Image: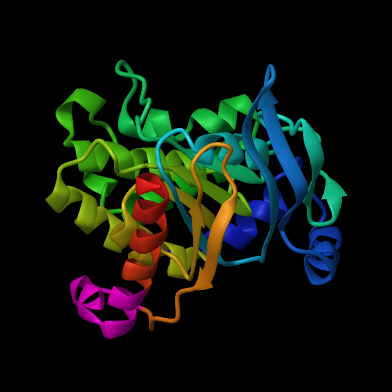
Amino acid sequence: MKHVGAAWRQSSPTAESASTAEQSRNDAPLIELSNVSKYFGELRALGPIDLAIADASFVSIVGPSGCGKSTLLRLISGLDRPSEGRLQRYGADLDGPSRQVGIMFQDHVLLPWASLLENVMLPADVFPLPRAAALERARWLLELTGLKDFADHKPHMLSGGMKQRAAFCRALLPDPELLLLDEPFGALDALSREELSLELSRLWQDLARTAILITHDIEEAILLGDRLIVMSQRPGRILLDIGIDLPRPRDVDTAKRQRFLEIKQMARDLLFRRKQA
């Protein structure tokens, strides 16, 4: 089946101008945080954070529970606002959610009474999006993720991994520039988690989109990302920001490479020494 991403963006009346987006992409990072902090009452949950994320990169973020990883993702998504500092998307102040940002959570949140295809099509009603183009893209995404033969099945008929694939398709339906992944495989068994991590790595390469992954799993973070960020305990700050210079495509043997083990140990040392201190 043909790739429908470019045609989809051209057919959508709500998408930003392609020429404007291209110009912005050349001039500024996709996402940039400058001295960003987030408070809940008098409690500083996050920051200060300085971070720039380039277009078409895959950034993995790890850190202890309660350090503000999910809060950071909400800020980047536009679902919440920083208490201090500046947050920009392509050089413009971020002022709220956008269809250019897709989000995938740990819970698939599929509607139990709807078919797989109907669940994937939900963003077409929310934004709204052109129906015919959305349906073509939904079927293409289901085929891309191996779910084509299950389009008419209800969620209770599917495995946990298949449900997460469907959630991934739904997040990608509007063809977002940025995909935010908040521990999307956290509820799966170890085997399914590793399988889907490798599949996500392949899909990210095929789709050429920017991705930010939040996870507690250091190996998963290194396997998927081309950049690893390690955060401190609350208030979350950046302890380590390092490029993951491992070749792609990656597979189960990637975790045996010396460089993989070096990066893993570096992250573990930071996380566990801080915890013991």
Q: Magenta segment range?
A: 249-262
Residue found at x 86% / y 59% = 20
Quadrant of the image occupied by residue 238 = bottom right
Residue found at x 82% / y 54% = 17
Q: Is residue 97 visible?
A: no
Residue found at x 74% / y 63% = 29
Q: Nearer the viewer, residue 1 or 171?
A: 171
Q: What main secondary structure does the magenta stretch of the protein show?
A: helix
Image spot of residue 96 (x, y percent): 75, 32
Q: Considering only vertical position in the picture, is 149 above or below 146?
A: above
Q: Considering only vertical position in the picture, is 2 above or below 83?
A: below
Residue found at x 53% / y 37% = 234
Q: Is residue 77 magenta?
A: no
Q: Considering only vertical position in the picture, is 226 above or below 199?
A: below
Image spot of residue 64 (x, y percent): 40, 42
Image spot of residue 36 (x, y percent): 74, 43
81 sits to left or right of 217: right
Which quadrant is the N terminus positioned in?
Answer: bottom left
Q: Nearer the viewer, residue 72 or 63?
A: 63
Asked which colour scheme the image uses, the reply is rainbow
